[in-house]
Image: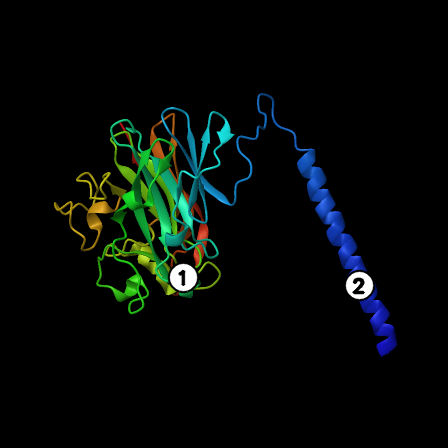
Amino acid sequence: MAGRRQPLNRALRLAALVVCAAAILGIVSEAAATSFPTGFSQDVVASGLTEPTAISFFPDGRMAIAEKSGIVRLVKNGALQPTPLIDIQARVNDYWDRGLIGIAVDPSFASNPYLYLLYVYENDPNDYTGTKTSRLTRVTVTGDTASPASEQILLGSVVANLTTRSCKGFPAGSDCLPADGYSHSVGHIKFASDGTLFIAVGDSASFWTVDVDALRAQNLDSLSGKILRVTRTGQGVSGNPFWTGNANEKAAGRPRIVPEADRAIPALMTWTDYRAQLMAKGVRPAPPPASPPAYCGAAALVNLATVH
């Protein structure tokens, strides 16, 4: 029986390899045969990138491209520049879905020469897979580069350390952006026409199992699972619905939270041109009677703000 099973096992492995090869060839063939609707075409803007996550344009047409590891590349006059715009790999934790996820060029770049960065902060390289925190910063761009020394922290000034490894270990309302899980961390940065920034912050809970940390999205004393609206310096905005009258208030973070924060765990944001609406795409928490209601629910698309 053993002698018969051995050839059979070899035959099964061979068959599996054939199936995998056929599948790969099918995918390649399908990609090569991709056709576009009338009026659409595909052009390579930049190649040689490593895990690009976000792009943002300068007023003069240059394009900044974020790479997950913490490098920002620059495309100028149609060519990818050999020198990075900035390299903050030493400050970025890129384990699993973490990394440098969001970037934005200041729309008033001539008077505010800033590039805004949203990433998971690396507090301890020896604990690469451990719980982390995130931060929103800005750097000053001079010519085609920005110095890491120019970085200013706007949000996420309270960070994990060897004693307190998670935002859960700090007082409620701390200026702490959690990155406990391997995914669902920070997301996009979008500027509004009034110069304020919208920041997407995930719940940093598990994406494959029930996790009570997902409930932080419905806790106004936590910055987890929220859309935040702040000024260029990270302060709260008086037009926000949970405004307390103190732009510098770190407790609760409520001056920064905007409507719909408890309806979807935010990930992506975009402005719609035809109505100047900021839309967020994310995962809606499962409604009761889920117990605890911490599962990922259906995808959600919600209107966060309308600019008149």
Kindly identify which numbered label has been placed on residue 125.
Answer: 1
* Amino acid beneath label 1: Pro
Provide residue 21's location: percent of width, then percent of height. 75, 50
Name the colour scheme: rainbow
Q: How far apart are marks 1 and 2 (CA)?
A: 43 Å
Q: Residues within 10 Å of mark 1 (few under 14, many from 20)?
A: few
Q: Residue 12 carries which label?
A: 2
Q: Nearer the viewer, residue 17 or 266?
A: 17
**Nearest-to-viewer mark from 1 and 2:** 1
Locate residue 292: give its quadrant: bottom left
Mark 2 Cα shell of 10 Å, populated few (<14), some (14-19), many (≥20)? few
In terms of image quadrants, where is residue 275? Answer: top left
Q: What element carries label 2?
A: helix
Residue at x 41% of width, y 25% of height: 61
In this image, 60 relative to 249: left or right? right
| Viewer can see residue 302 | no
Which residue is more in the foreground, 234 or 49? 49
Q: Viewed as shown, does residue 243 lie left or right of 37? A: left
Residue 5 lies, in percent from the top left, at 83, 73
Q: Residue furthest top?
A: 39
Residue nearest the observer in this picture, 102 or 302: 102
